[in-house]
Image: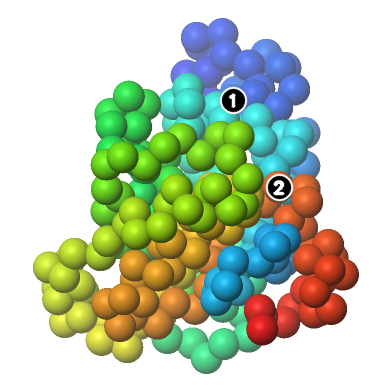
Amino acid sequence: MLLDGALDLLLGGACVGCGRPGRSLCRACAVLLRAEPRPAWPDPVPAGLAVPWTAGEYDGVVRALLLAHKEHRVLALRRPLAGLLADAVAGLLGETPPGPVVLVPVPSRPGVARARGHEPTTALTTTAAGLLRGAGADAVARSLLRSRRGVADQAGLGAGDRAANLAGSMRCPPGPLRRLARTRPRARFVVCDDVLTTGATAREAQRALESMGLVVAGVATVAATRRRLPGRAAAVSGRSPESGPT
């Protein structure tokens, strides 16, 4: 992080959040990232969705940082964003028995990673696992999911269309699972993504993992869109934000 900041200064960089000259994330905007992780049920909730936790709202500084990291490869933002993802995972697992956990990033559509020049969600998930290990958790990140070709861009699609577009789009090859089982035979799995919108992507990732007999403890994201934050789904369904789908 210090090296990234120094390079930004030398190259005439600016804060992604506020435009202030200097490093990619200034101290004032870094303070704005501090938030308590919380459940973030989509509305409507995809049937069977594991409990989703998020660290922030997809707006303002968080949105600007996620877009800069994903679309423009501002790699200096990886650690602060991964810190938010780690917070969401910690919140999700906070009231469950300790034990090994495997963070599984949602894969990009085929060709997208090549076009971007990196796999942003995988990078954030790997860094988040390292941060959790530093805090004493038995956490690793594994890219267990593959996405098939032919999935359309999700932008502009509603909840139903997103679910239909993604149905059966992910698979979990058995080879990596066999290797993982030798070291973590009783691990819980957490689906990780950058943003939660309708929950269709997370639900498809969960389905693919569960089809291989894996236990998915929940979903963790850096941010959730405003209409997905706690309260709205609960008000519609009669659930409390902390309770799971029925």
User: In the structure shown, which secondary structural element does the residue marked by tag 1 occupy?
Assistant: loop
Residue ranking furthest to the bottom: 97
Which residue occupies 84% across, 78% down?
238
Tell me the residue that label 2 is attached to: 225
Which of these two is toward me, 186 or 48?
48
- Could you say which quadrant of the image residue 184 lies in? bottom left
Q: Which amino acid does label 2 sit on?
A: Thr
Q: Which residue is drawn at 27% across and 77% down?
A: 212
Q: Residue 24 carries which label?
A: 1
Residue 229 vs residue 75: left or right? right
x and y percentages locating residue 104 in the rendered image:
38, 62
Residue 96 image-quadrant placement: bottom right
Q: Left or right of 225: which side holds 144?
A: left
x%, y% of residue 229? 77, 58
**Residue 197 can be seen in this image:** yes
Sequence-wise first label, 2 or 1: 1
Q: Between 172 and 36, which is closer to the camera in this rendering? A: 172
Judge left or right: residue 166 versus residue 195. Answer: left
Residue 1 placed where, x, y %?
A: 50, 36
